[in-house]
Amino acid sequence: MAAGLKKIGGFMVGLGLTTSLMGLVPSEALAGPREQAAQLFSRINTVPPSAATLDALAAKITAGDARGAAMDAINDPAGMFYNLTLKDAVSRWTTKDGSPRIELNDYTTTVIGMVRDDVPFNTALSADLVYIADVAKAPGVPAYSLANNAHFQFLDKAAASLKDVLIQVKQSSGTAALPVDATAGLMTTRGFAEGFIKAGTNRAAAAFTFATFLCHDMNKLADTTRPDFHVRRDVTRVPGGDSAVFRNKCAGCHAGMDALAGAFAYYDVIEGKTADTDVLAYTAGTVVTKMNHNSDQFPDGYVTTDDSWVNNWLIGQNAAIGWKGAASGNGAKAFGTMLTATDAFPTCMAQRAVATMCLHQPTTNAELAAVTKIAASFAKDFNLKNAYADAAVACSTP
């Protein structure tokens, strides 16, 4: 881990910085337009600018166009914003421990492509799309498949410029495994499946989607006032011989999570001999076995019979999420649409952008004010590139 950085809550936190009155960046970084330009470019691209680029960015900052300078830095021909900064940030979204140490995959490239192309990010959990390499720009790349990661391993090994080689295709046409109705953007990529659908009970698919896109983990969502009708049979009602433990602790998460995780009832990962040969599988109308396993723990618990889901967190403490979508539905696509319609979604995406560009989770009044401002703008057009550009400006210039 780099010197002066500490991992807290999945974000890299910079230590020992003397902040300016803005509360966002080291005071020495605000000495003048050239210093601000250098800081801006480095935050966006992870590497320092060339002399010519530094001159151009400093000129824009001097002219009062820091936002324009940020967009120029994002669009730098070397593409390091995409290959380094964004890749690192999004790779953390694909692992349960928030680690970026994972192979490039279709989840990460799809976020990168959507940002590059200004695709409205409120479709990220519902659209029939995935970003893969253009074979004309990456000669020899293996075909994209939900059965292996060879396509993206090739791009990683070749150090391909993701800014230049990625193209958008339909998930439903790129692989025979997913019909249109079963596509749900990032949640039906192989990268997501490897992280959150493989093994387990598919609860992780719902739990980590909340954590990544609403910035609410299960500890924050737990609400023991919600009815426990949808808690599955594999959850004992007398843990340790005490039924009060279930009602006062276990049900806090399971009452809401189990009611929503049905959205993934038809998805599974068929494990191969190695992780590279695991296959994302979808079978319409057939509930995967693991959704109903360990039924002897509490035989009278909920039995999953289809891919329906219901939102038990509309009232109570989690009403603060700002629900605007459907209260119930079927499948991952409808579930994703519901999540991205919340007030929490733009706030979470703004928080992630600021955390990436400031190198730590926003905590000061100025940082939190930047999150609020960026979230309000993001909620109008759902342009994640703009959110990163605004965050870079907030974290690098006075």
Image: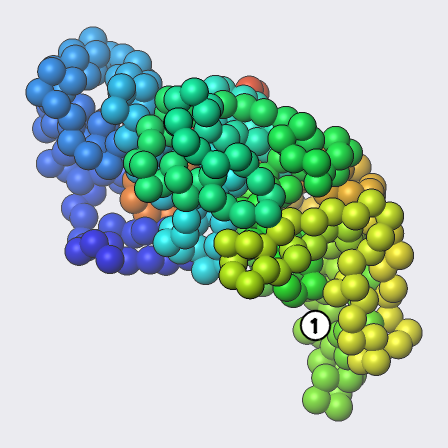
Give the total of numbered labels: 1
Residue displayed at 17% across by 56% down: 3
Of all residues shown, which one is farthest toward the top? 63
Residue ID at (54%, 47%): 148
Q: Is residue 213 or residue 173 the one in the foreground?
A: 173
Relative image position of residue 335 (x, y in whole percent): 73, 41
291 on left or right of 249: right
Question: Does dot 1 land on a helix, a strand or a loop?
Answer: helix
Reading the image, the residue beneath label 1 is 250
Quadrant where the image shows the N terminus: bottom left
Residue drawn where x is 78% and y is 58% of the image: 288
- In the rendered image, which quarter is residue 41 located in? top left
- Nearest the eye: 151 or 183: 151
Which residue sits at x=21%, y=12%? 60
Q: Quadrant of the C terminus?
A: top left
Q: Position of residue 70 (x, y in %)?
A: 29, 21
Left of 271 or right of it: where is 87? left
Can residue 228 be seen here? The reply is no
Q: Can you say whether 348 is above or below 52 in the image?
A: below
| Left or right: residue 229 compared with residue 35 | right
Q: Quadrant of residue 27?
A: top left
Point out residue 296 in the picture as x, y percentages from the top left corner: 83, 80
Residue 12 seen in render = yes
Q: Position of residue 16 (x, y in %)?
A: 18, 53
Q: The residue under label 1 is which amino acid type? A: Cys
